[in-house]
Image (cartoon, rainbow, N blue to C red):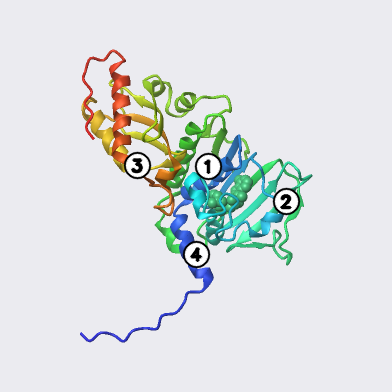
């Protein structure tokens, strides 16, 4: 067939570009929530309260007691690439925060209605602002004034994401069900609550009528990582976990983990991986641990592994994936080997005479 005549190339309007970009970063409610939790942690919060309606599609609300946002910063809060966390590309190599791209809130504002109520310690009242497509818009419908309005509020920030994907109907259709989305949200909250012992976290469904729906996750400030694992996965799981720790200088690794032993028989494998405090997938690590445990776990049963690795920020690339879910790092083989060896040592020291083969 004859080739068709080429069609003219034209630049997309900015709001179309932004909406497409937003869809890559915010793929479902749980991605949005992960970004919001990370922002609250970056703001130094010790209390994070999450309320969810319709699997986060109707409402995703997160309240923290962190630093709050300066009133003067509110107008550019949801512009793309506005951040308080880095100033130069080089800062990425010593990143001490979750955030750095200044894209999360911007993205959310392109696919949802966003309302922010925030108060710094210095302000005498809180300020409320609403956002759409990156811009501040009037808080009250019908009003023309988009300036933040003063209101009552606690120190910290409340972010409400309403009607997620209202303007991207294909995305909305692709999501399976509110129950499924809520399960994914809970998984994110559970992971962060376990990793952030010292921060009280809760998550509940907003119930019409009764305001005191019971929380599905509810951790307290004083609870330890192990306490929080027990609170979520139950005492029987907790009682079968062993602590694994290592501090190595070359490559620089700080390993902290709670792993199940030889008698544990999980129907499903549970892997909670954190690399430099970010909840991530790490396929090489998962494959190695699966192989390790398959040597001695009963057929069809799987381990529980909570594992945190702190690596030289210089050697971690968190920017390989739009949702930052899979991260890349240097010295992967050595580090995975170190994890399996330390785990083997710990299990062997539990008086189990089996030999634990480590093969990476
Ligand atoms: P990033 O986290 O990459 O900087 P975000 O879009 O997630 O980008 O947030 C933009 C900025 O808004 C942050 O740099 C921070 O200054 C501010 N911010 C967002 N959420 C909060 C919060 N819960 N408390 C205080 N400041 C916040
Ligand atoms: Mg952020």
Disc 4 vs disc 2: Cβ atoms closer than 8 Å?
Answer: no
- Which residue is under mark 2? 127
Measure how far apart labels 4 and 2 are at the Cα level: 27 Å
Q: Position of residue 101 (x, y in %)?
A: 52, 54
Say whether residue 86 is left or right of residue 333: right
- Which residue is under mark 3? 282
Measure how far apart labels 3 and 1 are at the Cα level: 20 Å
Measure how far apart labels 1 and 4 are at the Cα level: 29 Å
Q: Residues within 10 Å of mark 1 (few under 14, many from 20)?
A: some
Q: Tell me the residue at 71%/53% (across/down).
A: 71
- Which residue is under mark 1? 96
Q: Tell me the residue at 65%/57% (across/down).
A: 130
Marks 3 and 1, the one that precedes in the sequence = 1
Q: Tell me the residue at 36%/20% (across/down).
A: 240
Q: Position of residue 141 (x, y in %)?
A: 69, 62
Marks 3 and 4, the one that precedes in the sequence = 4
Secondary structure state at the residue bearing disc 4 = helix
Marks 2 and 1, the one that precedes in the sequence = 1
Q: Tell me the residue at 50%/44% (across/down).
A: 94
Q: Residues within 10 Å of mark 2 (few under 14, many from 20)?
A: many
- Which residue is under mark 4? 19
Q: Position of residue 314 (x, y in %)?
A: 43, 44
Mark 2 or mark 1, whichever is nearer to me: 1
């Amino acid at each position: 067939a004859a080739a068709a005549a080429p069609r003219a190339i034209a630049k997309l309007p900015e709001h179309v570009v932004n909406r497409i970009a937003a869809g890559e970063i915010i793929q479902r409610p749980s991605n949005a929530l992960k970004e919001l939790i990370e922002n609250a942690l970056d703001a130094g919060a010790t209390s994070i309260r999450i309320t969810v309606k319709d699997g986060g599609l109707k409402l995703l609300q997160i309240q923290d007691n962190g630093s709050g946002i300066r009133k003067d910063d509110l107008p550019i809060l949801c512009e793309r690439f506005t951040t308080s966390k880095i100033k130069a590309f080089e800062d990425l190599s010593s990143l001490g925060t979750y955030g750095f791209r200044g894209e999360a809130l911007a993205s959310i504002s392109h696919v949802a209605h966003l309302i922010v109520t925030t108060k710094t310690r210095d302000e005498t009242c809180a300020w409320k602002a609403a956002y759409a497509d990156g811009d501040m818009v009037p808080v009250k419908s019908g009003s023309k004034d988009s300036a933040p309005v003063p209101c009552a509020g606690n120190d910290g920030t409340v972010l409400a994401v309403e009607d997620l994907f209202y303007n991207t109907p294909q995305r909305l259709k692709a999501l399976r069900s509110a129950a499924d989305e809520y399960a994914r949200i809970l998984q994110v909250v559970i992971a962060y609550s376990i990793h952030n012992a010292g921060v009280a976290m809760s998550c509940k469904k907003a119930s019409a009528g009764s305001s005191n729906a019971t929380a599905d996750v509810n951790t307290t400030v004083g609870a330890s990582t192990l306490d929080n694992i027990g609170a979520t996965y139950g005492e029987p799981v907790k009682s079968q976990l062993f602590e694994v720790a290592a501090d190595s200088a070359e490559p620089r690794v700080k390993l902290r983990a709670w792993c199940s032993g030889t008698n544990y028989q999980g129907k499903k494998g549970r892997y909670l991986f954190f690399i430099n405090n970010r909840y991530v997938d790490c396929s090489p690590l998962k494959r190695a641990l699966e192989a390790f445990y398959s040597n001695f776990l009963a057929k069809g049963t799987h381990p529980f592994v909570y594992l945190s690795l702190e690596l030289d920020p210089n050697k971690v690339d968190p920017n390989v994936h739009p949702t930052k879910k899979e991260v890349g790092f240097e010295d992967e083989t050595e580090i995975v080997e170190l994890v399996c060896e330390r785990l083997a040592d710990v299990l062997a020291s539990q008086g189990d005479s089996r030999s634990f083969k480590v093969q990476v």
